[in-house]
Image: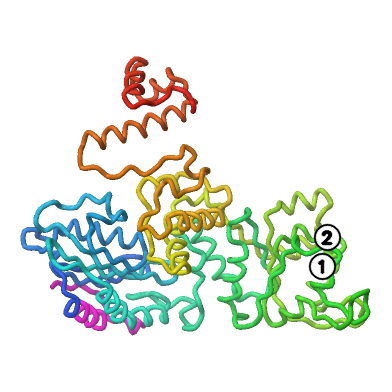
Amino acid sequence: MRKTGRPVRRSNVTPQFLSHVADVVFDHVAADAGVFRAFDARGEPAFEVWRGLDAAPAGAAVDRGDGEALAGRALEIGRPILVPDLRREPLFADLELDGDGRRPRSVLAYPWIVRGRPAGLVLLVRRGQATPFDAENMEFLTLALAPVLFLLRKRGGASQGAEPGPAAADGERPAAAAFLGGSPAARRVRSLIERVRDTEAPVFIAGESGTGKELAAKILHDTGRRRGRPFVAVNCAAIPEALLESELFGHARGAFTGAFRDKVGLVEEASGGTFFLDEIGDLPLALQSKLLRVLEERTVRRVGETRPRPVDVRFVSATNKDLEAEVERGRFRQDLYYRLKIIAIDLPPLRERPDDVHLLLNHFLDEFSRALGRPRPFVSPVALEMLLRYPWPGNVRELQNELQRALVMAGGEPLVLEEHLSPKINPAGEVHAAATRRLAEAKADFERRFLREALARCRYHRTRTAAEVGLTRQGLFKLLKKHGLAARPG
């Protein structure tokens, strides 16, 4: 076993402590090879213990390159992984692992994420005909790592040499990492949320439908100083205009027909907490002036009453409309627009952060599988390619709905296949072809898919298709005939 580590400042997660935990893991979970690695705040390895993965492959139980490839994939997946047999695991199918007697066979991995960033990893490998890892091994690993994860989260996620950030001073404060994504755009959103979560100024969240505006508002509340107090959300487009004023500000008994008792408005219900106005662009002009008065005076006046009532709320609003254009058309008050948009957060559409689709996909598969009480399935390579290639005009909500549908269509099968996807994701209606060990059959299957996609891209123009794929017209016709493909749609 070889160990490396750097000194730690202002943290209970010392190299000695990590070394002790690594010894416990390696001594109690039998493995041919393994690595225990922790990262600093910059994402660099700051502590490392490995066994059977030496720099000299000849003396190692498992090839070092294979171990690093498996560790990298485990960090990409970002959740605990138990693989009885790598040969039947789609998540690792594309890795080119060494084929000799030291080839990994069963994998147990536990990557951990703190404040949205990789903080460490444990990877254990068994090779050859060794008994595969099982659920008991995963349970022990989870319990062994619990103290490490607790201390890392309490100290703000820095395992080595990092000063605690603002959130580290409060161990009970949740992180803004619930807005998932590793792309620069997602990181910017999380960073902005962390900077403004404790301010009292109104926050305006802009973004297309389905980008997670209410989620961002909830994170602002749950991570700010008003957490633990009410979070009240209202969709301005969902309540009839005649009832909206009463819903927002409340009413006195007898204020109008049907007002049989006093009613507390939603703004008052949010007192001490956060009031979230979704689809603020649909708020009627008559109510915009009354909302402006609430923002300026910090009081509400119930319908049918004359005395104002003080309220202490933080206002967060959101819309998918272009409010500047609405102001120019006279549909939205300019003074209210500027009053609401003191702090602005722009949520990027999913097409502008395609690298996050895979992360979100795994998150939703985990979440929906737990809700359905089923084992978490994996996505076949072809289905995954289709999901990653789709532009997602409905953003995260559309991805969420698609995966929920796919799980239902899969019916508890261990793989989500291309035929389980909706027609908008799989318009050609492709179906799963069973894997074959014959090179000729695999090559023919690839040629069929390749030609079908090329024909569709070129709108079934045969000369253009032949030029694009590097064939003559005659060569293209021969392949189409060989595979029984039509040279026109249908």
Residue 244 has which mark? Answer: 1
Q: Amino acid at mark 2?
A: Pro
Total marks shown come to 2
Left or right: 452, with 66 as reference point? right
Q: Amino acid at mark 1?
A: Leu
- The color scheme shown is rainbow
Confirm whether residue 338 shows in the render.
no
Q: Residue 4's x, y, as percent?
A: 20, 72
Up the image or down, 118 lies above or below 481; here it is below
Residue at 80%, 83% in the rendered image = 310
Left or right: 421, with 37 as reference point? right
Residue 78 position by quadrant? bottom left
Q: Are marks 2 and 1 in contact (CB under 8 Å)?
A: yes
In this view, the residue farthest toward the top is 474
Q: Could you tell me which secondary element the residue under label 2 belongs to? A: loop
Specify the segment rendered in magenta: 1-25
Q: Residue 60's x, y, as percent?
A: 9, 63
Up the image or down, 293 lies above or below 401; here it is below
Q: Which residue is mark 2?
A: 284
Up the image or down, 311 lies above or below 450; here it is below
Q: Residue 394's x, y, as percent?
A: 58, 51
Residue 133 is a magenta residue: no
**Sequence-earlier tag: 2 or 1:** 1
Residue 295 position by quadrant? bottom right
